[in-house]
Image: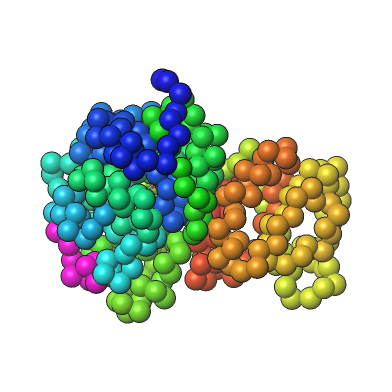
């Protein structure tokens, strides 16, 4: 394929998508790799460009609630309430798919994930195209999701038609995915819209049970988010400053001391051992920085990325999920 076009033009992005091309698009979560949702050949190219397993479904992005009807058969009343409360925003709703949709969109499932991104440029693209845009994250399969257009280029240069350039993403983690095909909303993948957020609209919203995961959210089965370095948990370091517990240097690791990086909310007890340190001022900043920090650490050539453990609740649950999976512990 020819070089990937870098553009800031909505009209150019729309023209490429309209003719069946692939365009990486900014959203508030991560950059997505877009193709028109009604074009099976364009969708097949997404899987090819990413090296994505064929059983991992895409998310259909819409510019209005009315457009949801272009891809889904029906919307439960509580799902409509969630759309009205949280869209545009980092919330994907899984709904029954229309029979005329290409099978690549859903990876052969009877359901489809739909979301309205909170990014004016990308909503303008979808609106002008007049068709929902299918987009998974715009990284090579298994790699950390891209939070900058440069990260998209790093993974997909020459494999996609264009990148719509905008600033870094503000949330930094992929959307919360919620199954809306049953009686109550069920979280399949945690994200920045938390269980408490959903319960404020629908008190019976719940987490998936572990045995429901693989069946209902196929993407959870796959290797994900891994940089070219080991990722491991450390800390937490907020309880005292004595440097006890996991803060103590591990002698078996001393030989790697010059090739580790650290990201967390607090200073690590042994800062001199790290070639790169990022102290995030909040959980939201930690989430926003995580995947970019992975890529910066890769570029430094570090062997081991140390992530400070956070409480597994609210946004901390999404952060814990991504770091668990990047570290291979789930
Ligand atoms: P990505 O945008 O790369 O995170 O990929 C989209 C993710 O959305 C998938 O890996 C699934 O976790 C989720 N998803 C999309 N469609 C469905 C669906 N029909 N049922 C369950 N999960 C879905
Ligand atoms: Mg992805």
Q: Is residue 283 above or below residue 3?
A: below
Give the total number of marks visible in the rendering. Answer: 0
Query: Looking at the image, can residue 188 be seen?
Result: no
Report the front residue among 246 and 166: 166
Residue 110 located left or right of residue 234: left
Q: Which residue corresponds to the image point at 43% horizontal and 30% vertical from the top-left? A: 5
The N terminus sits in image quarter: top left
Q: Quadrant of residue 32?
A: top left
Residue 255 on image: x %, y %: 85, 42
Report the front residue among 66 and 269: 66
Q: Which residue corresponds to the image point at 34% horizontal and 43% vertical from the top-left? A: 10
Question: Residue 78: within the magenta?
Answer: yes
Bounds of the magenta span? Answer: 74-81
Report the front residue among 306 and 151: 151
Residue 120 located left or right of residue 69: right
Q: Is residue 149 above or below residue 192?
A: above
Residue at the far top: name it. Answer: 1
Q: Is residue 188 above or below residue 86?
A: above
Residue 152 on image: x %, y %: 50, 38
Question: Residue 93: within the magenta?
Answer: no
Residue 196 on image: x %, y %: 41, 76
Q: Which residue corresponds to the image point at 26% horizontal and 69% vertical from the top-left? A: 84
Q: Which residue corresponds to the image point at 23% horizontal and 58% vertical from the top-left? A: 64
Residue 201 on image: x %, y %: 31, 77
Query: Looking at the image, can residue 201 be seen?
Result: yes
């Amino acid at each position: 394929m020819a070089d990937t076009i870098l553009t800031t033009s909505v009209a150019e992005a729309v023209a490429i998508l309209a003719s069946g091309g692939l365009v990486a698009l900014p959203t508030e979560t991560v950059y997505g790799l877009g193709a028109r949702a009604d074009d099976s050949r364009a969708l097949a190219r997404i899987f090819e460009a990413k090296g994505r397993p064929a059983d991992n479904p895409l998310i259909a992005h819409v510019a209005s609630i009315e457009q949801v009807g272009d891809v889904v058969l029906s919307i439960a009343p509580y799902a409509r309430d969630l759309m009205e409360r949280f869209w545009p925003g980092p919330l994907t709703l899984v709904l029954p798919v229309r029979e005329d949709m290409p099978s690549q969109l859903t990876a052969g499932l009877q359901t489809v994930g739909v979301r309205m991104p909170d990014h004016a440029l990308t909503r303008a693209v979808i609106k002008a195209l007049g068709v929902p845009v299918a987009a998974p994250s715009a990284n090579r399969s298994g790699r950390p999701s891209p939070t900058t257009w440069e990260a998209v280029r790093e993974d997909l240069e020459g494999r996609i038609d264009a990148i719509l350039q905008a600033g870094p993403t503000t949330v930094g983690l992929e959307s919360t995915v919620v199954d809306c095909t049953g009686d109550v909303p069920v979280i399949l993948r945690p994200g920045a819209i938390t269980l408490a957020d959903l319960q404020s609209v629908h008190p019976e919203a719940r987490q998936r049970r572990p045995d429901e995961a693989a069946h209902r959210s196929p993407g959870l089965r796959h290797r994900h988010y891994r940089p070219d370095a080991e990722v491991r948990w450390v800390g937490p370091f907020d309880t005292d400053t004595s440097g006890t517990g996991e803060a103590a240097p591990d002698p078996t690791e001393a030989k790697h001391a010059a090739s580790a990086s650290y990201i967390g909310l607090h200073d690590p007890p042994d800062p001199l051992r790290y070639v790169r340190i990022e102290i995030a001022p909040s959980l939201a900043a930690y989430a926003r920085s995580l995947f970019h920090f992975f890529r910066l650490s890769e570029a430094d050539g570090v062997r081991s990325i140390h992530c400070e453990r956070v409480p597994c609740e609210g946004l901390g649950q999404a952060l814990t999920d991504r770091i668990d999976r990047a570290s291979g512990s789930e």
